Amino acid sequence: MSKHKDLIEMMSQLESAEVPYALASVYSVHGSSSGKVGDKALFNEKGIRLIGYIGGGCIENRVAAAARESILDGNPLTIDIDLDSDQMNMGIPCGGYMSVIVEPQLVNPIILIRGMGRVVEVLCQMASLLKFKVIIQAPKDEANRYPDANEVITDPLEFEDIDFSVDYFILATHHRNDDQIACEALKKGIPYVGVVASAKKTGIIVDYLKKNGISDEDMSRFHSPTGLDLKAKTAEEIALSILSEIVMLRNDGSGRPMRQVKKSAEPENQS
């Protein structure tokens, strides 16, 4: 039986509850150290150790700070700890040196898609493949079209009643009140509000938003026509265009061809 059985069980519980955490593991030790290679601990987003052991109090404090940072920015960190250093404030030095890797385990971003049709079906499939938590709001007779969705909502859903976090919202209903829905989503504070619409309809929606109190700053979260310019023609290409824009924004990408990005990163010829 694994000595980390309780830790693994807690990881499973945190995953099920969709709570972010960081896994810290000792992977190198030289000399004397209370923490040993293979020791592990879980930390929450406040840096509080939930379970496990990676060393004494001063070591734990260093790792806790790294855990907070890694959960905040989503990047793993490695920490090299000199147990002889005066900065450790350990009194009698241990005389060792250890290294710890801290790996953030983050909640998958939530994408809420309201609408129906082939574009929505493909969006659901692709978003699930990209590890989004996908929530679909669609008519009841369409519910079985989204097997990859984490949840399908068939009842009316007002934004004021949404009690879960939404990172991305895509509206693909093509209804007369799309302007009102977009406005409510922006006022809700959703970071990305995309509307599948023509340029003409987008202009109408933009006018409505500005007349109803949406500031220029908040308009930066509004994306319509949503997606990148791929000259998309099919439902599959449209879905690819939309999710490409979302991934680009999420990763702070440029959207430029990689051959141009590589070329611009090369140093200029000084001759």
Image: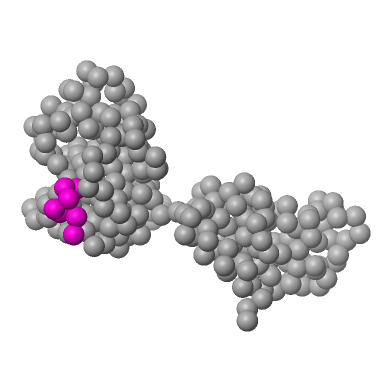
In depth, the one of 225 and 105 nearer the eye is: 105
Q: How many marks?
A: 0
In depth, the one of 136 and 130 nearer the eye is: 136
Question: Looking at the magenta stretch, what is its main secondary structure?
Answer: helix
Q: Which percent across, then down, holds residue 131?
A: 35, 59
Q: Which percent across, then down, holds residue 113?
A: 24, 47
Q: Which percent across, then down, holds residue 105?
A: 51, 58
Q: Which percent across, then down, holds residue 91?
A: 90, 55
Is any atom of residue 122 visible in this view? no
What residue do we see at 76% from left, 63% from top?
Answer: 55
Q: Is residue 2 left or right of residue 92?
A: left
Picture quarter containing residue 222? Answer: top left
What residue do we see at 69% from left, 70% from top?
Answer: 39
Q: What colouring method underlies this structural image?
A: one colour
What residue do we see at 47% from left, 54% from top?
Answer: 18
| For residue 7, above or below residue 108 | below
| For residue 37, above or below residue 134 | below
Picture quarter containing residue 21? Answer: bottom right
| For residue 247, above or below residue 164 | below
In depth, the one of 119 and 257 nearer the eye is: 119
Question: Where are the magenta residues, as a range?
Answer: 138-144
In depth, the one of 160 and 167 nearer the eye is: 160
Is any atom of residue 154 visible in this view? yes
